[in-house]
Image: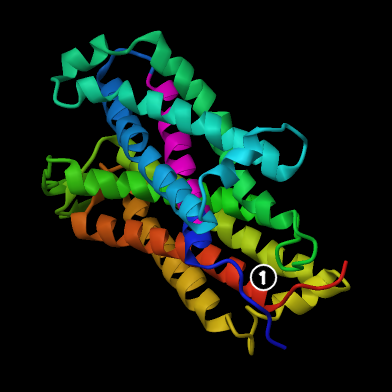
């Protein structure tokens, strides 16, 4: 049975870009709060926070613009702010509005120090930036969760009406946010220091390691391992998402068939979301972080590898929203 598809690419891009921007700003805020001491470590955390702060609002604003264009008239989204109630749409809209304002203000605090030397960066560390970082973390989490709750609030669409969908979108938003920071660092960071040959004593043996690539401060390892953890969590949440449908008697089990073997979205989901967007980047990040974890050597990552991993994660994040939105429409609506 075919159903009318009402939500197309503009809405899908909005859900994706809003989560992407929120994830990057949340990671930025947490990185900045972690950089509270005036020592060399502080500067590297500052750079990581700066990438997320400056590039995070860009997809957020683009996504909102696409949603307004999809609605056709500017007054339609503005109508949401004429009343305040406890509906997911109203709460999410207010979260989004406040978050856009605070994220732009947060990004502006980094612009004066863009081309300054290390010592000058610390002069711009005023309390307002820390306050905005503290505000943006819960707001960003709320916006990322809201993109999932927005779909889940429609019981007539059984695939969307799952309590696990909001968690899936949150974990995906944080993972794609880290990918955006890694991609920005890969494209704009100038330093590219080869890692020299190192001989390290481990259990009485001398292990020769020649690993050319980009050698980063500990924050590079932190980004890679955090993204690896989030990818693992996202795979687990996807498993729970599917299992919840199978353990549920009713329409959700029917709707889940769209992404299972024989379903219309099966190949798109398992190839682009799971394989390209999660499994392959996760395996690559595991391989790049194991030497640092086992042998305590400096973290090294090739520019091309970083670029491909971050792009793969970003593609997987978009395809996740694409599959969920489209599969939810071709398997519904159904009676409540």
Q: Quadrant of residue 250?
A: bottom right
Nearer-the-camera pick, 22 or 236 = 22
- From the top left corner, tell me how far across and down residue 180 is, in percent: 35, 48
- For image coordinates 39% across by 38% down, the residue present is 57
At 68% from the left and 50% from the top, the residue drawn is 149
User: Which of the 4 image quadrants contains residue 233?
Assistant: bottom right
Q: Is residue 30 left or right of residue 168?
A: left
Q: Is residue 52 left or right of residue 111?
A: right
Residue 112: x and y in percent read 22, 20
Residue at left 39%, top 17%?
129
Which secondary structure class fits the magenta region best? helix
- Mark 1 residue crowding within 10 angstroms, few (<14) / some (14–19) / many (20+): many
Identify the secondary structure beneath mark 1: helix
Q: Examine the rendering and report whether any part of residue 124 can be seen.
A: yes
Q: Which residue is mark 1?
A: 328
Q: Quadrant of residue 277?
A: bottom left
Question: Split into 4 quadrants, where in the image is the C terminus?
Answer: bottom right
**169 vs 39: above or below:** below
Report the magenta residues as a range. Answer: 15-35
Q: Is residue 152 above or below residue 82?
A: below
């Amino acid at each position: 049975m075919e159903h009318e598809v009402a939500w197309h690419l503009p809405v899908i891009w909005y859900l994706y870009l809003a989560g992407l921007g929120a994830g990057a700003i949340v990671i930025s805020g947490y990185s900045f709060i972690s950089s509270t001491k005036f020592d060399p470590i502080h500067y590297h955390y500052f750079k990581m926070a700066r990438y997320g702060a400056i590039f995070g609002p860009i997809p957020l604003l683009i996504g909102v613009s696409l949603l307004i264009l999809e609605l056709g008239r500017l007054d339609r989204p503005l109508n949401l702010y004429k009343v305040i109630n406890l509906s997911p749409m109203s709460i999410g809209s207010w979260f989004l509005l406040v978050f856009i304002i605070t994220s732009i203000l947060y990004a502006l605090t980094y612009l004066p120090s863009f081309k300054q030397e290390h010592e000058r960066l610390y002069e711009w560390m005023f309390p307002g930036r820390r306050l905005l970082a503290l505000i943006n973390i819960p707001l960003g989490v709320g916006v990322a969760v809201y993109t999932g709750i927005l779909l889940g609030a429609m019981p007539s669409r059984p695939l969307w009406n799952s309590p696990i969908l909001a968690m899936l979108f949150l974990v995906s938003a944080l993972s794609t946010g880290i990918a955006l920071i890694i991609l920005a660092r890969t494209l704009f960071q100038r330093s590219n220091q080869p890692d020299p040959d190192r001989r390290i004593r481990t259990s009485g043996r001398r292990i020769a390691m020649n690993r050319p690539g980009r050698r980063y401060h500990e924050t590079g390892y932190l980004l890679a391992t955090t993204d690896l953890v989030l990818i693992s969590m996202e795979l687990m949440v996807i498993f729970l998402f599917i299992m919840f449908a199978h353990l549920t008697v009713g329409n959700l089990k029917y709707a889940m068939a769209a992404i299972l073997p024989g379903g219309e979205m099966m190949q798109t989901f398992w190839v682009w979301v799971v394989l390209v967007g999660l499994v392959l980047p996760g395996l690559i990040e595991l391989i790049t972080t194991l030497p640092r974890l086992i042998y305590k050597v400096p973290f090294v990552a090739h520019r091309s590898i970083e670029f491909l991993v971050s792009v793969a994660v970003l593609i997987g994040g978009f395809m996740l929203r694409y599959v969920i939105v489209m599969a939810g429409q071709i398997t519904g609506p159904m009676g409540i």
